[in-house]
Image (spheres, rainbow, N blue to C red):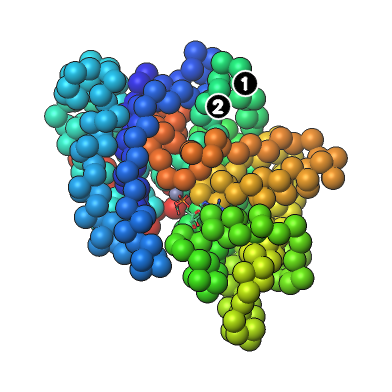
């Protein structure tokens, strides 16, 4: 089964063609094309929804055509002859952006009579871990064992899920206020770093091996699986305000300490949830999963505690928003919905 997937939940416009590998446990990406309007927003220090939606309209058809081009001379033939189903992000996300992808997918489904699969963007972030490695000929992905603990760390969400099998999952915890990516972006702004702050904080933190500063890891010792990041953001803002001007080495050290505080609680609570539920794997997804320090901290924690559960991270290019993860989720959940019942749902979480 070959799926054409479309993702337009925020500032990325992405289309991808995916299919399952013969062993049925992982997905293969045949094409994945993405255009982004992130640079447009950088000057404003955050996403401007109206601008993001306009860019989605501009990018959507060229991106879909590019994803289909390798299959036939024209995209109509490519869909007719090479695509079995269409998958699309239905939510959560920005309403204007979501509508562009959803309406495009509905139109293609109706015109070509192809089944349509609506996909929850957050769950799809975790399914980026079912995409085979780029160097699949030499390195095979280990199979993810159920039950697994899923940790979603994106710009808008920080959530822990217990995934019992492909069909059944349970939300067990999440952030009470800001998401971890959102906090990193806001802290980046306080430090005068470009938008989005997350990758810039990582880059600056790599310039130092230690820090004279330390920030509190929020809710580290609470007995639940909750997170909270607005306190960390305020603590850093107050610290910066008190200090006045910062030197470049000081900015590097603040970035280092921010990462330690933000990630410590993520790693510890995820590992605790895994032990408590006796899950067999940890699966991490979302933009912040691109961070190498987060990956390293998961590695250290699991080794130090003689913890046997394997932690999975997606290939870096599939951590940020992309259509390949949307298609991959759909490959494992191929039930379709009639095109006229599919809606853009900005607030949908775990349905
Ligand atoms: O998953 P994503 O692309 O979009 C949402 O669904 O929200 O995540 C975007 C978030 C932003 O907050 C960005 O700062 C963060 O992911 N991010 C990172 C890194 N790359 C992106 N955070 C930390 N380290 C990175 N390398
Ligand atoms: Zn996302």
Residue with the most extreme top position: 22
Q: Residue at x 22, y 17 (%)?
A: 72
Please tell me how crowded label 2 is: few (under 14), some (14-19), or many (20+) other residues with Cα within 10 Å.
Answer: some
Query: Which quadrant holds residue 76?
Result: top left
Disc 2 is placed on an element classified as loop
**Figure check: 214 above or below 316:** below
Does the residue tagged 1 have its C-beta within 8 Å of any atom of ligand 1?
no
The percent position of residue 212, horizontal first and vertical second, equals 77, 70
- Tell me the quadrant of the picture where the N terminus can be found: top left
Q: How far apart in space, not on screen, are marks 2 and 1 (Cα)?
A: 7 Å
Categorize mark 1 by other alpha carbons within 10 Å: few (<14), some (14-19), many (20+).
few
Residue 71 is drawn in which quadrant? top left
In the image shown, does 66 or 219 lie closer to the viewer?
A: 66
Q: Mark on residue 139?
A: 1
Farthest residue in the left direction? 111
Residue occupying the point 46% across, 59% down? 196
Camera-nearest residue between 240 and 177: 240
Above or below, 111 relative to 118: above
- Residue 300 shown left or right of residue 56 in the figure: right
SS at circle 1 = loop
The residue at 49%/39% (across/down) is 317
**Mark positioned earlier in the residue sequence (2 or 1):** 2
Q: Where 235 falls versus 340 (above or below)? A: below
- Identify residue for label 2: 133
> Foreground: 116 or 316?
316
Disc ID at residue 64: none
Residue 102 percent across, percent down from the top left = 25, 44
Q: Disc 2, disc 1: CB below 8 Å? A: yes
Residue 101 visible (yes or no): yes
The answer to whether any part of residue 182 appears in the image is: no
Residue at 27% in and 37% down? 63
């Amino acid at each position: 089964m070959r799926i054409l997937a479309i993702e337009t939940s925020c500032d990325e416009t992405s289309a991808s063609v995916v299919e399952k590998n013969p062993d049925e446990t992982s997905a293969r990406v045949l094409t994945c094309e993405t255009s982004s309007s992130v640079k447009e927003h950088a000057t404003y220090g955050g996403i401007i929804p109206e601008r993001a939606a306009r860019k989605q309209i501009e990018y959507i058809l060229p991106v879909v055509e590019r994803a289909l081009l390798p299959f036939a001379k024209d995209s109509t033939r490519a869909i007719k002859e090479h695509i079995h189903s269409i998958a699309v992000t239905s939510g959560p996300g920005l309403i204007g952006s979501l509508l562009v992808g959803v309406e495009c997918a509905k139109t293609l489904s109706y015109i070509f009579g192809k089944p349509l699969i609506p996909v929850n963007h957050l769950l799809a972030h975790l399914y980026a871990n079912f995409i085979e490695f780029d160097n699949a000929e030499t390195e095979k992905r280990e199979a993810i064992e159920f039950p697994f603990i899923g940790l979603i760390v994106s710009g808008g969400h920080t959530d822990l899920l217990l995934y019992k099998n492909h069909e059944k999952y349970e939300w067990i915890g999440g952030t009470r206020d800001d998401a971890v990516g959102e906090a990193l972006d806001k802290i980046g702004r306080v430090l005068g770093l470009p938008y989005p702050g997350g990758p810039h904080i990582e880059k600056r933190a790599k310039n130092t091996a230690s820090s004279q500063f330390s920030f509190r890891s929020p809710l580290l010792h609470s007995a639940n699986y909750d997170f909270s990041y607005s306190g960390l953001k305020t603590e850093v803002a107050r610290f910066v305000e008190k200090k006045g001007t910062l030197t470049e080495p000081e900015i590097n050290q603040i970035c280092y300490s921010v990462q330690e505080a933000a990630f410590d609680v993520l790693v510890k609570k995820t590992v605790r949830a895994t032990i408590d539920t006796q899950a067999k794997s940890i699966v991490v997804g979302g933009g912040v999963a691109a961070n190498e320090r987060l990956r390293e901290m998961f590695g250290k924690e699991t080794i130090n505690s003689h913890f046997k559960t394997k932690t999975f991270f997606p290939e870096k290019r599939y951590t940020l928003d992309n259509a390949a993860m949307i298609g991959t989720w759909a490959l494992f959940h191929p039930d379709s919905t009639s095109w006229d019942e599919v809606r853009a749902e900005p607030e949908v979480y775990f349905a």
